[in-house]
Image (tube, grey):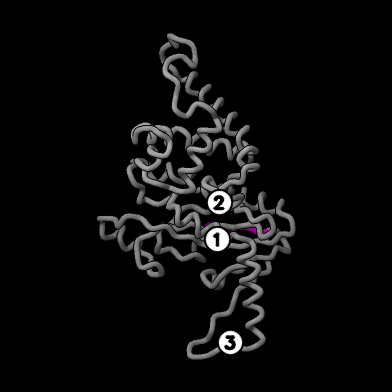
Amino acid sequence: MLTGLSLQAFLDLLPAFHLATSHIEHQDEQRRKQPRKRQKGGGRKPLLYSDADRLLFILFYFKVYPLQAVQAFFFSMSQAQACEWIHRLTLVLNQALGFEKQLPARKAADVTQVLRLCPGLEFIIDGTERPIQRPKDKARQREYYSGKKKRHTVKNVTIGDRRTRKIKALSRTRSGKTSDKRTADEEDYHFPARSKLWKDTGFQGYEPPKCRTYQPKKKPRNGELTAEKKPRIRRYHESECGSNIVLVARKSSILHAMSFAIGETSMSISALKPLAVCTIYAVTIG
């Protein structure tokens, strides 16, 4: 799917998108300094006339992430018009996902509340990195350089529900130098009692209270794993990949939705955070 959503998921999101559009248009009318001289809807008709067209436009942009010139070509408009529609519809989509209560929690207190509602209390925690343009300042170069990726990056930690395959929590954006475990420690997540948490070796030593953790064992240098440990690791990877949480994080990295390396746009990093939330949600339910 070019949008990351099935047809039914697209239709389910459309009413919330219409409501968000009406809400934002009403806010714009309230901020209008001069009275309207003609009725609403007058003048030249927009290229993206219906809400379905607009939702398709913005979901396609986040899923495929083409250059704005390519986006404009697909929807028969100029690059300037595509840029304007992207900025306008980003706010609408973010608010629509908020109405549907599909946005991941960002604050530690909200995360605890959200995780308690998950069936089975089984979670997967993972980190995702996205490349950015190399900073000119040497201090920032050291801060954002990721020794793991051998380039400058920013990263987030995600917590996903193992059963529903949806991301429930998203950490603050950190520099590439920050380790996954340190990010999780600083976020101070509190998991419900008797939770089960699957993690990789990037979270070595991360042991939340009242929570049972599962982590694969590394193969010793110049050695082999014992016959007893090999089935455990196989079961771990099967359960992890079956949930699609890790695949979702990887796809959000490919889309570069939160990176500084944004082609043909002047958005700031603070404005890009909602985009990543939208992208992760779209890929998760697709």
Magenta highlight on residue 94: no
Where residue 91 sits in the image (x, y, percent)?
Answer: 49, 35
Residue visible at 40% across and 46% down in the picture: 66
- Judged left or right of residue 220, residue 137 is left
Asked if residue 282 is positioned above or below residue 213 in the image, the reply reads: above
Residue visible at 48% across and 37% down in the picture: 57
The answer to whether marks 2 and 3 mark residues whose Cβ atoms lie closer than 8 Å is no
Give the labeled residue for mark 2: 283
Question: Alpha carbon of mark 2 to alpha carbon of mark 3: how far?
Answer: 35 Å
- Judged left or right of residue 99, residue 65 is left
For label 3, count other residues whose C-alpha is less than 10 Å away and answer few (under 14), some (14-19) or many (20+).
few
Q: Nearer the viewer, mark 1 or mark 3?
A: 1
| Three-letter residue code for mark 1 | Leu
SS under mark 2: helix
The image quadrant that residue 188 belongs to is bottom right
Tag of residue 66: none
Asked if residue 22 is positioned above or below residue 36 in the image, the reply reads: below
Where residue 113 sits in the image (x, y, percent)?
Answer: 67, 49
Q: In terms of depth relative to the viewer, which is nearer, 180 or 7?
A: 7
SS under mark 3: loop
The range drawn in magenta is 184-191
Question: Alpha carbon of mark 1 to alpha carbon of mark 2: how far?
Answer: 9 Å
